[in-house]
Amino acid sequence: MGRSALVAILTPVDTPDDPRIDDFRDLTTADRRPDRPGGRGLVIAEGVVVVRRLLESPYPVRSLLGVRRRLEELSDELTRVDVPAYSTDADTMARAVGFHLNRGVLAVADRVGEPDPAELLGRARTVAVCEGVGDHENLGSLFRNAAALGVDGILLGPGCSDPLYRRSVRVSMGHVLRVPFTHLAGTWPASLDTLRAHGFTVAALTPAADAEPLATAGLAGARVALLLGAEGPGLSDEALAAADRRIRIPMASGVDSLNVATAAAVAFHAVTGG
Amino acid sequence: MGRSALVAILTPVDTPDDPRIDDFRDLTTADRRPDRPGGRGLVIAEGVVVVRRLLESPYPVRSLLGVRRRLEELSDELTRVDVPAYSTDADTMARAVGFHLNRGVLAVADRVGEPDPAELLGRARTVAVCEGVGDHENLGSLFRNAAALGVDGILLGPGCSDPLYRRSVRVSMGHVLRVPFTHLAGTWPASLDTLRAHGFTVAALTPAADAEPLATAGLAGARVALLLGAEGPGLSDEALAAADRRIRIPMASGVDSLNVATAAAVAFHAVTGG
């Protein structure tokens, strides 16, 4: 696209208090769930790569705000959608959002309802089920690793953080916008029966010495739901008891467990990488 | 140990400008290499777990600085070493180091010379060789994953950051202090011959479509040097050409590569986890 065509779809914004960019104001709280103080539940994408993924996602994009140079990188996508793109300078942008953004472009979208677990599971071969993964960065990394290693969906049990929180979106490099996820309904961990009903073997990842070593567990190509707990506390006893199998990644003695997203990547590869 | 015995080994410090805690002053630059501005090349450990690992490491500890509660957690270790332990309050500590430290205890040590590559390789079965891993956090995570998954040492090629930089030490959870590492001498990548001379197969990790899939490469239990490049640019063409084998982790299309430390963990497990 030529420069003049891009100019035609950009809307210049000159002052940080322009009401057209209200969605980007006070960005540190705007992504909070609507039931939290200041939270509007918006989905926020930062940087060209993640904004591009948001534009390709099911989330309805409300608008973009960015410096000219970054919006130009998105010109192909912008000509294909009917979304306001506000062009401004770095200083005005920083004053509107409340801090300086290195990445130079933002997009906001509304949330959409989560898929029904049955719908997600019906077309999935490998899924992860998380219990107590409350750290936004770990959850974001887990989505990134799931996307890279061909995991079809993520089910959220109790105690997990919000995948659409801004920091998770950023750490996931936008893959929370692509990998389907949903909360598992019903009483935990009895709700894991939903997975078995769809033909999945529920394989819990645990450091327990009597669990089966991952390398010889024969999970490659199987229909597996990997059950993952938080780094540190790990899975609850109830969740471990509700799993069909208990799998361990052999660890050197005296070493803390791997980060949950890293352990998940090792296990994802064992299931999908063969 | 009783409280009175601990009191006997702690030295109270009341003011942030006490010269006995000069090692902890301006902490954001003290860990820089001695050839950089403000750099003194000290090894800095933050938090009880990492300080404990520093006390168990080959690095000669100069002193500790911490709040009473955190030093008490280290009392067993402190009674076994002859190292000054300065006890103070959180505010004095923050004013001395220049910022507030949640972890409440610090230790500083001097560097020691790196082992000779021949010495490190002689007693190793699995090693990683890094090219261009210039991000301190990625390098720290890589050491943590190497420690957890039983990798015996790390060789640093050109363009790698300093594993003993404070942020790497912290992200590694102190495992840079435990996993032996050294720089590979000689012209890169001809210097990879050193590994072959010690019986290692040099296996380069690459996203190239014509590389062998990791799962079927048969690396389990072999004497392998995994060659790892930076996320993004990856290994140089020269390094790839100098490897004995090229191995890939199958990735979903349209997804960025895994973080280098995560990819390394997947590969480490394939070699050591069987």
Image: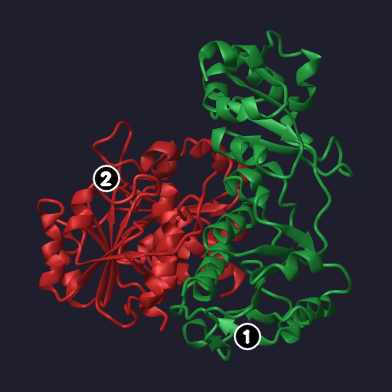
Chain colours: A red, B green
Mark carried by residue A137 = none
Q: Decide: few, some or many residues near mark 1? Use Cα within 10 Å; few <14, some 14-19, many ≥20.
A: many
User: The disc labelled 2 sits on which kind of residue?
Assistant: Gly
**Residue B89 quadrant:** top right
Q: Position of residue B147 (x, y in %)?
A: 57, 57
| Secondary element at image label 1 | strand
Q: Which residue is at the front of the view, A108 or A35?
A: A35
Q: Position of residue A187 (x, y in %)?
A: 10, 51
Residue A232, image quadrant: top left
The residues bearing labels 1 and 2 have C-alpha atoms spaced at a distance of 41 Å
Residue A171 position in % (x across, y down): 48, 55
Amino acid on which disc 1 is placed: Arg
In the rendered structure, find residue A159 and report the number of the disc placed on it: 2
User: Which is nearer the eye, B149 or B78?
Assistant: B78
Label 2, residues with CA under 10 Å away: few <14, some 14-19, many ≥20: some
Is label 1 or label 2 in front? 1
Judging depth in this view, the residue of B72 and A24 nearest the camera is B72
Mark 2 secondary-structure assignment: loop
Q: Is residue A133 above or below residue B149?
A: above
Same chain, labels 1 and 2? no
Q: Output the chain of dot 2.
A: A
Question: Would you name the residue on which mark 1 appears?
Answer: B246
